[in-house]
Image (spheres, rainbow, N blue to C red):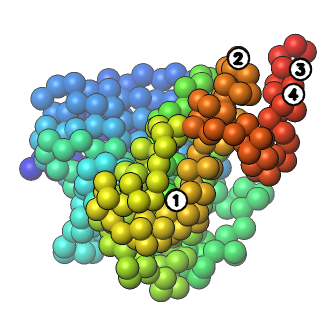
Amino acid sequence: MIEILLSPTSTRDILTQISDHLDGHIEERWGEYTMTIDNANALGKITYIPFDWGVNLLDFDIKFHKEFILKIEAEKYNPIRFIYNLKGSFAHRLEAQKVERKTQQFQSVIFANKSDGINYLHFPKNEKLQINFIQITRKEFLKKRTTDVSTLNKKLYEVFVDTDYENRFLHYGELNLKMADDVKSIRNIKTKGMLRILKIEAKIYEILSLHIQQHNRQNSGEKLPKSISKQDLKTIKKICNLIEKEPSKQYSLDQLSIEYGLSQAKLQNGFKFLYKRTVTEFIRHIRLEQARNLIKTTDLNISQVVYTIGFTSRSYFSKIFKEKFNISPNEFKKQIVSKVEI
């Protein structure tokens, strides 16, 4: 096990100091800093993107070939960190704690340290990691005109206004599969330049809101439904991913129940818990979203779109499309065509 001491004055310092210790290589493009590495220490990349008002992203997509502990001093750079673990696992503790706690896949942790503290992040050997760090410098963030931390629950409010770093804060989140979708979607952003950064920033604020919502739920004592285990939810997440990947496939509640070994009641309760929709409503939602995307990005006519996404009735498709988007498919297509012509 190798310990690396970091003494950053900014998030970019964290990236630079990690790179120096592990012999990585940093490149900057459109304000996005990426450290790539392929040596005896690790394989993969760590990305840093700074945004306005003290918000930034530190994104790990890496496999360490050795067991590392990052010891991050809090004296000079001491943000609130909102961390979500998309893949793999890691352990964390504050210096005041004697025992570290493991954060598994799809779980989160929020922490802030005292000014004289050290944060310990313990990464395993030979495990693929995808970890999303949102970091907020409190003094800068509070200057933002639209920031109103008074609307937060008491515990989070006290953390945000603690700009002298007098207190510690630590919160471990439960399984959160909705956050996985938003974290994953950042990796699917293909645009370049300023547009890319703006899209990523929008997603960062969505993820931040999910962290806050989860903290509110746990703080109020809300638990997972008793009838559904964490493993059940992970299985349901696999089903959701399949539907998103192949929306045109004909699914039935009975077939999904048999294939994945979950009762129909568990399937329905799981979908409602994760997406506030029944299985049928979720499938319809995904198909309509894909239909709108196909109309925007392809030359397919409406009938071709209908059959491509798995519907058999054009009239039914037109009805539910208008109910969802407040415009008929034909009118939507005309709008797209007219914009292109202009």
Q: Few, some or many C-alpha atoms within 10 Å of disc 2 (few <14, some 14-19, many ≥20)?
A: few
Q: Callout 1, which amino acid?
A: Val
Left or right for 195, reference 123: right
Q: Callout 3, which amino acid?
A: Ser
Q: Are marks 2 and 4 in contact (CB under 8 Å)?
A: no
Structural distance between the alpha carbons of marks 1 and 4: 31 Å
Q: Which mark is residue 338?
A: 3
Q: Earlier in the sequence, mark 1 or mark 2?
A: 1
Identify the residue under disc 1: 279
Structural distance between the alpha carbons of marks 1 and 2: 30 Å
Q: Which mark is residue 299?
A: 2
Q: Secondary structure at mark 2?
A: loop
Q: Earlier in the sequence, mark 2 or mark 4?
A: 2
Q: Are marks 3 and 4 in contact (CB under 8 Å)?
A: yes
The image quadrant that residue 130 belongs to is top left
Structural distance between the alpha carbons of marks 3 and 4: 5 Å
Residue under the point 59% across and 82% down? 154
- Picture layout, residue 157 above or below residue 253: below
Q: How many marks?
A: 4
Q: Earlier in the sequence, mark 1 or mark 3?
A: 1
The x, y position of residue 45, in whole percent, is 33, 32
Identify the residue under disc 4: 335
In this rendered view, identify the residue nearer to me: 170 or 273. Answer: 273
Left or right for 168, reference 309: left
